[in-house]
Image (cartoon, rainbow, N blue to C red):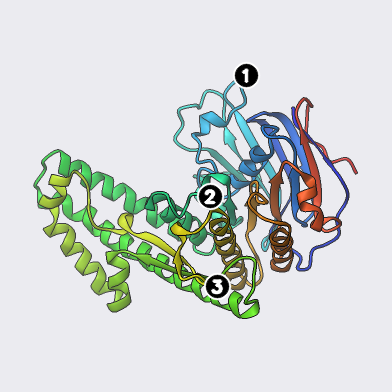
Amino acid sequence: MPRAVPFESATMPDAAPRLWVERLTLTNFRNYKSATLELGPEPVVLAGANGSGKTNLLEAVSLLAPGQGLRRAAYADIARVPGDGSWSVAAKVHTDLGAVDIGTGLAAGAENAAGRIVRIDGVTKPGSGVLADYVEVAWLTPAMDGLFTGPASERRRFLDRLILCFDAEHGRRASRFERAMQQRNRLLSDEVRDNARFQGMEEVMAETGVAIAAARAEASAALQAISERRRERDQDSAFPWAKIAVEGSLEADIAAMAALDVEERYRAALRSGRERDRAAGRTLEGPHRSDLVVEHGPKAMPARLCSTGEQKALLLGLVLSHAELTAERQGGRAPILLLDEVTAHLDAARRAALFAEILAIGTQAWMTGTDAEAFSALQGRALFLSVDEGRAGVWPQG
């Protein structure tokens, strides 16, 4: 099994993180039979060969927050093979509420369970949503390198995940909207025409849909403001400023009308559009049709037309802007950042700039790479761990 050993100890970063993982313990998790990491608040560098288990550690940390984690994997697929189907992640996390013990996982024989077990200080909680009260996590993985050229659904998911860091209710609203829309779509496909059966679902969709759109519009405007502030601080930043907006019918209405008026308009649109939606086999209007639009500011070019390196730099700029925004809104508490293979497509200057920003923001950033030398600018300021196959556990050696 993988084993992690530090290359050297670290000093405190420029701004001390207020949210950080002190201890992480995995049991039957992916390729880890049993593993424990003891950590400080400083950034964490995980170096090792491809397939050694670096990203698995990031996934474990991502499951300390609500949702399905950075891979969005079925919970049954996380269990180690061979095994009994169970897995667990346990952590001691320092938060503004003090140190808290978080546990999550799946019991043996629960492979078909819809959710995962969540415990806070040993007390079982109903669902992962409660984790939003303790931990905020944002991530960037190689699978997201095509975010600007891929489907709009991936960009919506990216923005929604960012919003969750400072608006825990956003995820619950999105879940309510999705359930109501699915029920409405089922009625449409079943040729139901009973207005009374549609009314309740459309009421929920109008209420939650407008709230979702308003949160996205507000978040994109706030990110735009942070991006512009970053431009003022450094015109030649390695991570270019961006123009950020959300395009959609509800977002356009919110910019011009009161929220209650937008709700009424959307409610009426759903009612009058039933036959059109029935013919299409789905609901054609709502926040599930919106898109996050990003433009490379200095070049005035849509992000989707930029080079691979430019798109990576834009993505990192968005993640850093979001971390800065979250810290600003939460009295200095930045989210934990999970940056998988983050140095890919970055030259030495951009790597150094990235590390400097991470230290300045004050986040316990977890970064992976195959070459520890790519992180040399963090020597003495981060905890370096080497992840290797063939060992029974993961133990920092001091």
- Residue that label 3 marks: 227
Give 229 or 103, whichever is nearer the viewer.
229
Q: As drawn, is 273 to the left or to the right of 295?
A: left
Which mark lies nearer to you, 3 or 2?
Answer: 2
Q: Tag 3, which secondary structure?
A: helix
Between the residue at mark 1 and the residue at mark 2, the CA separation in whole angstroms equals 32 Å
Q: Amino acid at mark 3?
A: Ser
Q: Amino acid at mark 2?
A: Asp
- Which quadrant is the N terminus positioned in? top right
- Residue that label 2 marks: 145
Looking at the image, which residue is at 72% across and 62% down? 349
Earlier along the polypeptide chain: callout 3 or callout 2? 2
Looking at the image, which residue is at 49% across and 61% down? 163
Between the residue at mark 3 and the residue at mark 2, the CA separation in whole angstroms equals 20 Å
Q: Amino acid at mark 1?
A: Pro
Neighbourhood count class around disc 3 (C-alpha, 10 Å): few under 14, some 14–19, many 20 upward: many
Q: Is residue 37 above or below residue 255?
A: above
